[in-house]
Structure formats: C-alpha cells, structure tokens
Image (tube, grey):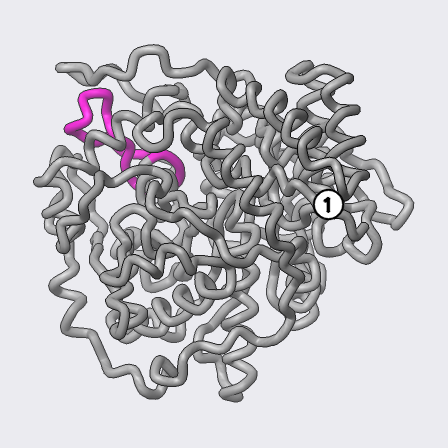
Amino acid sequence: MENIRLHIVFSMILFACLTSNSHGLKTQSEALSRLYKNKLKTKTQIDTSPFSAIADFSEERIQSHKWLKNNDLITELPGQPPVNFSQYSGYVTVNPSTGRALFYYFVEADPEKSSEFPLLLWLNGGPGCSSLGLGAMEELGPFRVNSDGKSLYKNDNAWNLVANVLFLETPAGVGFSYSNTTTDYEKSGDKQTAIDNYVFLLKWLKRFPEYKDREFYIAGESYAGHYVPQLAQTILHHNKKSGRPIINLKGMIIGNAAINDDTDDLGMIEYFQTHALISKETLNQYLEYCYYSDNADDECDKAWDQIAEVFKDIDVYNIYAPLCHNSNLTEIPKKASVLNFDPCSDYYVYAYLNRPDVQKAFHANVTKLPYDWDSCSTVLKNWTDSPETVLPILHELMANGIRVSIYRSARLSSSPHIVRRLSNTSPHSCVAVSFSIVLPPPPPPAIVVASPFFGRTSNLGCVFGLAATRPLLPGWFTVAKHSGLKMADERVAWDIGGLNLKI
C-alpha cells in the first residue's frame, strides 16, 4: 500500500512514557499529535545496505581505553542496599568532532558467575526514551527507587542474574547523553543511531576488553524494534567485512516491538476499539481518512485527535493499571515490591536521578546540561529517518544464524497481540515475527508463549504463540521462576499479559 500513512504507533511509542510523567511536554496527546504531523512529511523506505561506521572509528584504529574502566567504577549509589556485584557508568564519545557522547550504566553479574554469563545490551525505545531511567530503574535493572526518591531496593528479577547487562542512553539528547553541537539533536534518526551505537560498542569493548569475545545479545522494547535489528545488522555487516567476529553477536530479544508500520498502526487502532477505548465510528473514520486515503489530511488529523484523547486517561503499557494520582514523595519509603506495581514510580526515578549526589555517583551530567534528566527526551525535536518495516532485516539476521526472540504483552496497547497477528499474516513475514524464533530449532526444553491465538495456524502456516527454542540466555529458566512463571512438562508457560511487567 503506497498511501501516506499516519504511523501512529511510531508517534505513540515516542513519548508513551509521558503517560504518567508530566516533567517534559504537557500531555502525551500533544506530543503525539505534533510528532505524527512531522512524520507525514517524510516516508523512509528500508535501507538494506550495510550501515557504514565512520572510517576513523574502525575497530583497528580505536586505542585501548582499559584505564578508563577504573574511573567508571561506581563505589556505591546513594541509598543503595549492599550488593556483591560491580557497577560502572560513564561516557563514551562517539563523535569527537561534534562532541557527541553516550552515557552508559553497566551491571555485572555475580562475580563467581559473571565470567560464564554473556554480555547483553539493553535499549529502550521512544525514540527518545531512557534505558537508565526506564530500563534499569523500572524494569530489569538491579534496583528500584523507593517512594522517598532517595533510597533504592533490590529487584529480585534483575537480568544480571543471568547476564552482564549494559544499559545505553541513545541517541545523544536522551537522558544524560549529549552533544556539544546542538544541531546534532535535529539530525537524529535510525541510521545515525545505529552507527553511534556501533561505535559506542567498539570503544566500550576497548575499555572492557574482557568482554571482547564474550557471547553478545541485544535486547530492547517498543521502538527498539528498530534499534536492535539495525544495530545487529550493522554488527553482522562489519563482521563479514572484516572476515572475523569483531563483536560476538549471538542473538537479539525485542518486546512489544515496533517492526512494521502497516500492521503496527492498524493493530493498535483495532485494539483500542475491541477494548472499548474508542468507538466503532472513530475506528471507521481512521480507516477511511488515514488508512485508505492519501488526500484527507484534515479529516485524518481530526480522527487522530479523537484517538489521542484516549492516552490522557490510561497507561499505555498496561491499560488495566491504575494511574498516578499523588506524585509527591514520601518522607518514609512505602513498603516496596517489584510485583506490586506502583504507577508513581516514574516520579521517584525522576527525583532520584536529578539529585546532584546521585549524578556524581553515576559520573553523569559532567557538562552540566541546561535541562533536567527526564525519562523521555525534551530536546529531540526531529527524527530524520524511520523505515516503514524492519522485517527484511530480521530475515537477513536469521538467515545468518542470529537468534531472534520477539515477545509481547496482552495488556500493552502500543504494540498489542493484534499487531503480531497481522504481521504473521503478512506475506513473507511468518518466520520473522512468530512470538519467539530461532534457526535452526534446537531440542527441548522450549519456551511456549501463551497468547490469545495459542495453537492456531495462519494461512501461511504460522503457529501463533509457539516457539521451538531453548532459552536465549543461560539460566533463563531461573529468571522465569523468579518472575512467578509456571513450569510444565519441561516448558515454560509464559503469559506476559498476566504480569505487571513493563518489559
């Protein structure tokens, strides 16, 4: 279909985290309306050519930065409980000429096991949202912030139980990442982000050479459905070009991913209507003026405005979750638990990461940025390129032996199960977007992802909800047990929709 598309899912995911966080733009609907109108001006096709990192940043030309590792060691974060693993954070300059630097937070596994575990890079989506504040502090990192905004408690489901986890705030302008050339913020896009992320990894591995040959995985959520496969493709192409594994990429994991505009847009709007969030009339207006028409911009804007009103009153990560009605911090921390979802956690993280002593401990904000840290960027005003689909990249990765896992949440409206269903019925996309994939299929045990379509077969022969894979990471079943997932017949029944997990 060659009509101009709204790409609403792109717009929605960009500032989805602002649903319960008003530190940035006034409302999420305002942010979404502005962004989708900008997206209408351009239409970017998939670029299947190798992303070329700048020659000066080739792996051979980068000098060892091992001495910087000691400077990045975190002795202790303010309010942190005792732990036995090491933490590091700091900056890696990805473009010296413009002064563009990306901020990272690295959490090693238990010292007795860290050498056995792989290296995993986590990327949050947006584009423009923080892997430190969201990924590390609210999702899979070792700590969560208490309601006082001053102290931390342990996350018993942290991913560093099974991997050495690297969180990256990308692109520049997100979180503590910055550029000394502010026009960089107007040039951000998929391709530049992939290049910067690749250069970051090359330099970071010079700083941490013990991970140079470690098995490497890339994981992320939402718009990381673009970031992750694009970075994986960049690594794959440079490995092929050099004739050796510069980075030992083994697989990728993406959750609730934006991967294909045609199905992402329609699936999300259908989800809204089937869950009584919008009327049938609004759905029909969207279909008539936005999906099937090329020349009805004014009517399409009106349809979108009606849809955007929905975002004011729900959490797009979990449409059944309560909203935050009291964002004030407490003098004494409330009793906290990872399993007891707190809708005000965004505010706790915001308060914590804007404290000077916390930033000093993280080696962050060294240039004294003229704005607060925020979970989603307020300085990225433009996104230059965003291909309509990354399915060809997924096919290429799997054809080259890269293991791919895609999961989804039944309660998340931005990339709902309907999207995965529609993608599975698109031509040539079956193997790429089944809920969890690996080529070739290894022997049991396997992960079985429970879904509303479990066991059904599409007209392409796709079996929905079924994945013949072993865990992507060693010890994955351990995490499953920690998360309260059920074990049955040497398989894991994984129903993300039944958990309040923002992953």
Q: Which residue does the image show at 13% across and 65% down from the upper left? A: 70
Q: Which residues are magenta?
A: 138-155
Q: Position of residue 254 (x, y in %)?
A: 55, 49
Q: In this picture, is 302 found above or below 408?
A: above
Q: Nearer the viewer, residue 495 or 15?
A: 15
Residue 168 as seen in the image, left or right of residue 359 = right
- Residue located at (32% from left, 51% from top): 173
Image-quadrant location for residue 100:
bottom left
Residue 219 visible somewhere in the drawing: yes
Look at the image and tell me whether residue 164 can be seen. Answer: no
Residue 316 percent location from the top left of the image: 53, 27
Magenta-drawn stretch contains 151: yes
Residue 237 in the magenta stretch? The answer is no
In front here: 488 or 497? 497
Q: Quadrant of residue 202?
A: bottom left
Residue 484 at x, y percent in the picture: 49, 29
Q: Nearer the viewer, residue 127 or 104?
A: 127
Identify which amino acid the numbered label 1 is placed on.
Asp
The residue pinned by badge 1 equals 262
Q: Badge 1: how crowded within 10 Å, few (<14), some, or many (20+)?
A: many
Q: State the image coordinates of residue 215 (x, y, percent, origin top left).
A: 45, 67
Q: What secondary structure is found at the residue carrying circle 1? A: helix
Q: Nearer the viewer, residue 279 or 342?
A: 279
Q: Is residue 39 above or below residue 498?
A: below
Q: Is residue 137 left or right of residue 484?
A: left
Residue found at the very far right of the displayed protein: 459
Q: Residue at x 20, y 47 (%)?
A: 84
Give the total number of marks visible in the rendering: 1
Q: Residue at x 50, y 27 (%)?
A: 29
- Residue 255 appears in which quarter of the rendering? top right
